[in-house]
Image (cartoon, helix red, strand yellow):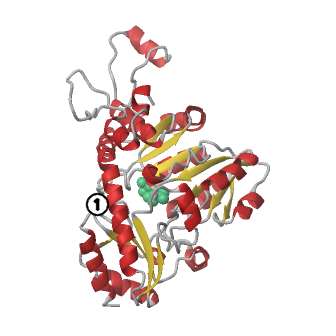
């Protein structure tokens, strides 16, 4: 981060960091929708390809709009380097695959976003990279899973959909002692509420599709870490295999960052309001919210997070039938597996996002048939609560 940015608080960096102004002096960041770049002379092209002169060559490698998004993300996160990808899954895959070769071993928490679990459990082993899934909240299991060839640890916290909290600093310590790195998927907390690098992680990944866009428009991802981590593991893989982000999507996400702090604070307030409004309702049998003192890992949340969550998970009476009747009775809140949107969205994980892993794995993760996950949007909190309470009457 340039020294000129370091003195500003994260909210200010979200608006200004990384801006590159063209010769036209535009206020808003320009969208450079170009595949390639022209050179003044043959000698200049040669110098660019030999890395003897800074500048752009091809948008699979780098693009000015993408560079602005990456610089703003790095400044916000407090990371030395960031690389944007086409999706959050590309970011996760690059961060894990980029560190490993056949014969290596990965340890991951079993409470993962569905596709992340597929990458660890099914995809990496096809290329000779073994994996072990552990209960992320049980530090002994991380320790016991370590093998001489363990290369990296991977976790998300708060977890999807049950909002369990994993102690990042404690897991980072175990990883370091094992000579392994730690990658944290920080989508649910956002950089606003949790800084995994400061807690000892080596790499942070985001699906920018979620709170960073925040208005449900386009897909994107980011990998962040120390310059050396990115150069050694991420840079060539992205450049040569091509999970690069479109400059258009990077531009949308760059503009999304400007409003992220305002949106996420408001959505978090609404989520906290919902958790209070519903916790004692006779049709709600369980309420999970990281800001609540009755959360199973409340002390860890207090220690490592600066805010609650824009998501609330709760269990509706009557199992699957009860949850379906409840969701179908909602008028304002829409049924969708996405999250972080301006629109409040609700999902039934057992039949959608976590359907693939089967009943036994769901039981292990505490995902019951009555459980729903609500992503709070930007509507008036009273309208969100009234919609939920009216639908609970129909259960
Ligand atoms: C959505 C999500 C992803 C995947 O991101 P895409 O942009 O959909 O590829 C990964 N991890 C978490 C926690 C997510 O919520």
Q: Quadrant location of ligand 1?
A: bottom left
Q: Which is nearer the eye, 98 or 272?
A: 272
Return the x and y of residue 57 as percentages of the image width and height: 40, 24
Q: Which is nearer the eye, 297 or 228?
A: 297
Image quadrant assignment for residue 360 = bottom right
Number of numbered discs visible in the structure rendering: 1
Return the x and y of residue 107 as percentages of the image width and height: 67, 56
> Is 334 situated above or below 193?
below
Q: Which is nearer the eye, 165 or 226?
A: 165
Task: Check mark 1 vs ligand 1: CB closer than 8 Å? yes or no.
Answer: no
Could you tell me which quadrant the N terminus lies in? top left
| Rendered residue at 33%/23% (across/down) | 37
> Is 336 situated above or below 233?
below
> Is 383 situated above or below 44?
below
Return the x and y of residue 125 as percentages of the image width and height: 66, 56
Residue 244 visible to the viewer = no
Q: Which is nearer the eye, 374 or 290?
A: 290
Could you tell me which quadrant the C terminus lies in? bottom left
Image quadrant assignment for residue 382 = bottom left
Q: Which residue is mark 1?
A: 342
């Amino acid at each position: 981060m340039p020294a000129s940015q370091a003195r500003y608080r994260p909210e200010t960096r979200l608006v200004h960091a990384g801006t590159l102004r063209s010769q036209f002096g535009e206020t808003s960041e320009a969208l450079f929708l170009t595949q390639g770049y022209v050179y003044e002379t043959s000698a200049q092209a040669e110098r660019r390809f030999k890395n003897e002169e800074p500048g752009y060559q091809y948008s699979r490698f780098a693009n000015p709009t993408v560079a602005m998004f990456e610089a703003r993300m790095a400044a916000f996160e407090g990371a030395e380097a960031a690389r944007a990808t086409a999706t959050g899954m590309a970011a996760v895959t690059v961060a894990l695959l980029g560190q490993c070769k056949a014969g290596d071993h990965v340890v991951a928490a079993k409470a993962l976003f569905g596709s992340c679990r597929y990458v660890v459990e099914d995809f990496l082993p096809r290329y000779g990279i073994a994996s072990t899934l552990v209960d992320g909240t049980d530090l002994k299991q991380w320790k016991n899973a370590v093998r001489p060839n363990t290369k990296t640890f991977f976790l998300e916290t708060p977890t999807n959909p049950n909002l369990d909290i994993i102690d990042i600093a404690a897991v980072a310590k175990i990883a370091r002692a094992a000579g392994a790195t730690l990658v944290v998927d920080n989508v649910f907390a956002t950089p606003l509420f949790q800084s995994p690098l400061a807690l000892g992680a080596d790499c942070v990944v985001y699906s920018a599709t979620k709170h960073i866009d925040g208005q449900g428009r386009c897909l994107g991802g980011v990998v962040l870490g120390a310059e050396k981590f990115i150069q050694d593991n991420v840079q060539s893989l992205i450049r040569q295999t091509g999970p690069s982000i479109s400059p258009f999507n990077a531009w949308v996400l760059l503009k999304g960052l400007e409003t992220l702090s305002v949106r996420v604070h408001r959505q978090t307030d609404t989520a906290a309001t919902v958790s209070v409004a519903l916790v004692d309702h006779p049709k709600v049998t369980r309420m999970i919210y990281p800001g609540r003192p009755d959360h199973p890992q409340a002390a860890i949340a207090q220690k490592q997070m600066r805010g609650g969550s824009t998501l609330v998970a709760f269990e509706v009476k009557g199992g699957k039938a009860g949850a379906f009747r409840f969701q179908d009775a909602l008028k304002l809140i829409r049924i969708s597996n996405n999250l972080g949107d301006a629109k409040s969205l609700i999902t039934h994980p057992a039949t959608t996002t976590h359907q693939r892993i089967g009943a036994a794995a769901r039981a292990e993760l505490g995902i019951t048939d009555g459980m729903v996950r609500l992503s709070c949007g930007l509507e008036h909190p009273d309208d969100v609560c009234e919609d939920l309470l009216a639908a609970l009457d129909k259960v």
